[in-house]
Image (tube, rainbow, N blue to C red):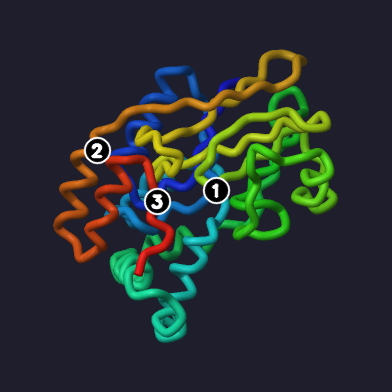
Amino acid sequence: MIAALLSDIHGNLPALRAAVADAEARGAERFFCAGDLTGYGPFPSEVCRLVAERRMAGVLGNYDGKVLEAIENPAAFEKAMKPAKWRILDWTRTNLDRKARGFLAALPPVHRETLPGGFALLLVHGSVLSADDAVYPSLTSRGLKTKLGGERPDIFVCGHTHIPFVRRIGGVLVVNCGSAGHPVDGDPRPAYALLRIAGLGAPSARIVRFDYPKGEVLAALAKTPLPKSLSRDYEEGNKRRWMP
């Protein structure tokens, strides 16, 4: 079995389409999504639609949850957020169609599944502790126990940080998918992970970087009131965390 593990698409439909095509060309039969379908990019509803159409097993990301909360109580977010960040959230919540809202609202915080060979997969956005929690490549075995909150999967899949890595820690295959739509490590190519299970051998995974038609997302961004600095993010593989 080969499965594609994606996360943090953030409204970048051209990148998601390219990731799906690339993964299928490499033999992927299943798709898992670790959340954050929305935010920053100009295609929030379209990304939700494609993830739903492909029947990807998925979880709710922290930004997705924020969007749903902002739909119900925008004033609270507008007061608390910096102007540029509020512009992104406000545009996303107002451009998320009803079907996409329903799709996001139905996503669970955790997905558990037994894969071929009897291997237990645990899929979250940040960690079992919280969708806002972070799992970095420096994770220790002691730290992993905390992040898992008492669970013991064979395969632990997450996202949130946009920093992709694969490590085996204390017998657990830890996969942070990185970002399939908004990379932040200086490489403008998005990332996803390929999981392979062959017979009774231990599961393995690797990170895949891929190219996509970046001009499509840049052109769509230019037609929105979203901050123009986002275009530089996609061109440079960066994320301006300190927006005014």
* Label 1–label 3 contact, CB within 8 A: no
- Circle 1: residue type: Thr
Q: Residues within 10 Å of mark 1 (few under 14, many from 20)?
A: many
Q: Given this view, does label 1 or label 3 mark the residue nearer the observer?
A: 3
Between the C-alphas of marks 1 and 2, the distance is 21 Å
Q: Nearer the viewer, residue 169 or 236?
A: 236
* Label 3–label 2 contact, CB within 8 A: no
Tell me, for residue 239, which label it has, or none.
Answer: 3
Q: Residue, x 51% and y 39% (percent of image)?
A: 178
Between the C-alphas of marks 1 and 3, the distance is 11 Å
Disc 3 element: loop
Indicate whether 229 appears above or below 90.
above
* Label 1–label 2 contact, CB within 8 A: no
Q: Residue, x 77% and y 44% (percent of image)?
A: 144
- Circle 3: residue type: Lys
Q: Which residue is mark 2?
A: 214
Instruction: State the quadrant of the N terminus.
Output: top right
Between the C-alphas of marks 3 and 2, the distance is 16 Å
Q: Residue, x 21% and y 54% (percent of image)?
A: 221
Q: Which residue is mark 1?
A: 161
Residue 66 pos. (x, y %): 49, 68
- Circle 2: residue type: Lys
Q: Residues within 10 Å of mark 2 (few under 14, many from 20)?
A: some
